[in-house]
Image (tube, rainbow, N blue to C red):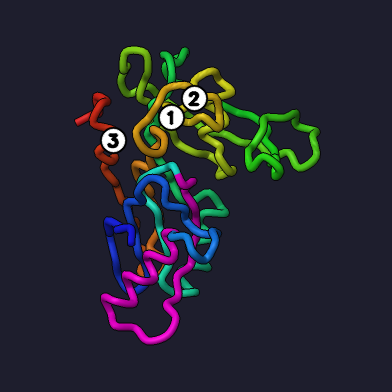
Amino acid sequence: MASLPVLFEDNHLLVINKPAMLPTMGVAEDRESVLTVAKAYLKEKYNKPGNVYLGVVSRLDAPVTGVLVIARTSKAASRLTEQFRETEVQKIYWAVVAGAINPPAGRLVNFVRKDERNRKMHVCTAGSPEAKEARLTYRTLSPQGHHCLLEVILETGRKHQIRLQLSEAGHPVIGDRKYGGTTDFSRGIALHSRSVSFRHPVLKTELTFTAEPPASWSRFRLPT
């Protein structure tokens, strides 16, 4: 069974550093997901009989790594979901992309829609059916030869948003063949949920969790 590096754990929350290629949830019963592995971990650690409750309040795509927040109670799930819905949660990502982006810092705004048949997202016009606005800001942290390392802050939370918008800007994420990437990456893609900040759903304290990128990022020059 896959291992889940735990960043934080209390009676209300479980925060992990998600490994690459482990889906968050929603897969066939014979496949592992963050949800099934986390439930097994808690069941064994606390010797819990019966089912273990976990509420997924946000997701990371299977090839994406980094901080992922899971609720351990329905009350925590409800309150965290509201924070994510009201964009009160700050999510910072690192992305290594093809080329040197110009300008080195900026904002991307697109309208996007789902393509259910191909399990992708597409950029569309504002008036297209089911179009939703996608917004993010970015800044270059360091050049990487033919690539560059970006810090990305989400303003909205659309499916595949960072991957699609950076690809649309001409700078696909390294390893992301679904969205135009042509450079190989050892496992997953070079997109990492670096930190997540939010209010504790019960204690109301401000929390920030940061995760180091996996070993596959050792080829890149990262900030110290």
Q: The residue tagged with tag 2: helix, strand or loop? A: loop
Which residue corresponds to the image point at 33% horizontal and 56% vertical from the top-left?
16
Do the residues under discs 3 and 2 have CB atoms within 8 angstroms? no
- Residue 130 in percent (x, y) is at 76, 42
Which residue is label 3 attached to?
A: 216
Which residue is label 1 attached to?
A: 175
| 209 w.r.t. 113: above or below | below
Q: The residue tagged with tag 1: helix, strand or loop? A: loop
Which residue corresponds to the image point at 42% horizontal and 16% vertical from the top-left?
104
Identified by mark 1, the residue type is Gly
In the image, 138 versus 112, the foreground residue is: 112
Q: Bin the neighbour count of mark 2 within 10 Å (Cα to Cα): few under 14, some 14-19, many 20 and up.
A: many
Mark identifier at residue 181: 2
Q: Which residues are magenta?
A: 33-62
Which residue corresponds to the image point at 42% horizontal and 59% vertical from the top-left?
34
Taking the view exactly as shown, the residue that stands out farthest to the front is 30
Do the residues under discs 1 and 2 have CB atoms within 8 angstroms? yes
Dividing the image into 4 quarters, which one contains the C terminus?
top left
Which mark sits nearer the N-terminus, 3 or 1? 1
Dividing the image into 4 quarters, which one contains the N terminus?
bottom left
Give the distance between the C-alpha atoms of the residues marked 3 and 2, in whole angstroms. Answer: 17 Å
Taking the view exactly as shown, the residue that stands out farthest to the bottom is 49
Identified by mark 3, the residue type is Ser
| 220 w.r.t. 210: above or below | above
In the image, 16 versus 184, the foreground residue is: 184
